[in-house]
Amino acid sequence: MRSRRASLTAPVLVVTLCLLSLACPARGQGRAKVRPTAAPPASAQGPTIQLDPNAIRRQMASSYESLVDVNNQTTITRYIEAFKNAKTTEDQDQLVSELTDYCVERGLRPSPDVAEIFLALAYRASAHGNMEEFQRLSRYALSFDPGHPAVHLALAAAARSKGGLLSGEFYYEALTALFLSVQNIETRWAALANLGLWLRLTAFLLLGVLALMLVIKYQALLRHDIREWLGGGESQWVEAAGLIGLFLPSLLFLSGYWWIIYWAGLFLVYARWPQRAVILVAVALFVLSGAVNTFYQQRLYLTAAPPNASNLRCYAHRIGVGLDAGLVEHLGAQDPLRGTYTYILASRYLLHGSYMKAENLYQGLLKDSPDNAGVYNNVGCIYYYENRYQEAIQAFTKATAIQPNLAVAYLNRSFAENKVFDFSASKTDQDKAGALKAGLLGVIRNSEAEDLSPIPVWLPLTKTTDIAARLDLPESSLKGPVKSADTWAGYLFLPPFSLMALVFALAFLGLALSKKAGYFARACAKCGQPFCGRCKTSLEFESFCSQCVHLFIRQDGVSPEARIKKNYEVERHLKLQRVQRLVLAFAAPGANLFLEDRPYSAIFLLFLWCGLLVAFALPFVGFPLPIPGMVSTAPFHTLMWLVGGGLAALIWLLFGLQALLSGK
């Protein structure tokens, strides 16, 4: 049986890691709720940041405002209206092809706004029961943004409707959506925040199970030591003192969470070294998971915080500017962040297709900072879109003169040179761009030169992230549910209970190492009764109490009544241990192995089991992905239940049911 378990270790681990990654972004959009948080008075603590999933979704959602000027947004809207009015599928295909060419020419690749419009049309068709139309429209969405998780979720739903749960296309699309949820710049931090939340909850549950095992195994030893330190005796006051020592933190702080943290450290003084190693690993995982959870949740908040949210929309190729109207308030000459906000707003207009507005803002920046290569590059992009190719070449040339290592400026100039038929100079600039930045030439596909468009330069996300972290916040820190963690120590120790878990573990481990052998009580290997150096008459046979030494080893002058009584105690002890192991094997496969002094196998199985339990609960407590509300994340949930349920059943059958049937 052991060889069989070992052979399953690798595949179980691999499948579990995939499953747990899947569970992280799995969140039903229709059930998104804000977890209640106590907001202190602003006058007492300053602004309070609430990590509101709905606010995140609103901030990241695309915007379709009706604007007066002709721009990318209004042009796309006209294409969509023509698409909806088309009489045949062939006409719709032609319009999609023309819209694709338009987006490519205007640098809108990928085009998440267009993809989401087609997704909205697809789900409208699905609501009317037309699944063929649903799949076709989802395919159109895929052509505009192949990396959008919502598109692949829609394709997974279409594949399941067509082929059922056994459809290979369903699994492929659901897994693709899973991996893209971590890669997509808009959904990345929500997916990673759920990963951090899963890891934190799993580590806490694992530590809780191990702490419970320690209590079951060693609580009698603690109570024995307290009784001996109080002078011995069997009075009720001595028994009460033992119970107080066992539940002290919860009595002081009125919180059951303290039991876990306290017990995990306290019983290190009685545990053996393999068990100590496992507990220390669990504590370290608990502390590190708190740091990961805090970091990811902070980044998730900052994706929705100005000005980082608007800058993020540039990287995500979002064309709507309605949600960026607040940037205008910071364009005054006296505003210290005027340059940053102007650059972002100009970039938003550039993507939106309002080129005159964008150029005016960029030219204003050049008056203040004439050596900004990124601005010159973006002005060149505007000239290119307006078919002013010679002026575009001049702007790109100024950008390369200011910043000779700006690879995109050379590549962009090559595109403009192609337009004026200067192919030799274009080839030289392309080679220069490829030499400066490996992989940049990958944007040049096997297509005509007219299909290529210049690449703008956005503000670094790190810059706007730093601004968002300290903007309007006291002492440059985050407040509210996402606590301040500006240093590695903050990330490690600010999460609840992380610091005390480490303090308790190290303090009690140091206490155990500082005392001589025999200072703390031990349990008899035969009958389970606690004993210590103060109540044992001989140092021989250290694993047995004095009674068991005389009864079962020396067998010297013990009365038959005493022998019968001791045999009964031994039998009762063994029966109690067996019942404990069976109950634990049924509830948490692997916990029984800890009582059998196999801690390394126990922590591995318990981590898998606890991780699965948390994964099943995560959709109810996790953060929603910032994708359109009409798109369902049901494929994530379905895949999680299929894979996770199967894995949980496999673990329980191999390590839970097997222990129950064997009766060991």
Image (cartoon, helix red, strand yellow):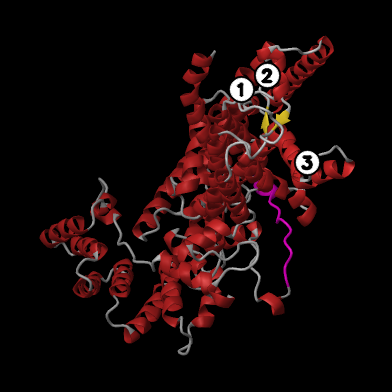
Q: Which numbered marker is on residue 71?
A: none
User: In which quadrant of the rendered image does the C terminus lie?
Assistant: top right
Segment colored magenta:
28-40
Q: From this viewpoint, is residue 634 visible?
A: no
Q: Residue at x 59, y 26 (%)?
A: 597
Q: Nearer the viewer, residue 331 or 474?
A: 474
Instruction: Quickly name the residue at label 3.
Output: 227
Is residue 35 magenta-colored? yes
Tell me the crowding category of disc 2: few under 14, some 14 to 19, or many 20 or more residues within 10 angstroms, Cα based. Answer: some
- Quadrant position of residue 265: top right
Nearer the observer, disc 1 or disc 3? 1
Label 3: which secondary element: helix
The amino acid pointed to by label 1 is Phe
Q: How many marks?
A: 3
Q: Residue at x 44, y 43 (%)?
A: 93
Label 2: which secondary element: helix
Label 1: which secondary element: loop
Q: Are marks 2 and 1 in contact (CB under 8 Å)?
A: yes
| Residue at the limit of the structure toward the front, as seen here | 557
Residue 364 image point, x, y percent = 37, 84
| Residue at the limit of the structure toward the right, as seen here | 236
- Distance of label 2 from label 1 (alpha carbons): 7 Å
Q: Nearer the viewer, residue 501 or 49?
A: 501
- Distance of label 2 from label 3 (alpha carbons): 23 Å
Q: Residue at x 48, y 64 (%)?
A: 487
Q: Relative to residue 306, is residue 38 drawn left or right?
A: right
The amino acid pointed to by label 3 is Arg
Is residue 610 magenta-colored? no
Instruction: Quickly name the residue at label 2.
Output: 549
The amino acid pointed to by label 2 is Val
Instruction: Quickly name the residue at label 1.
Output: 541
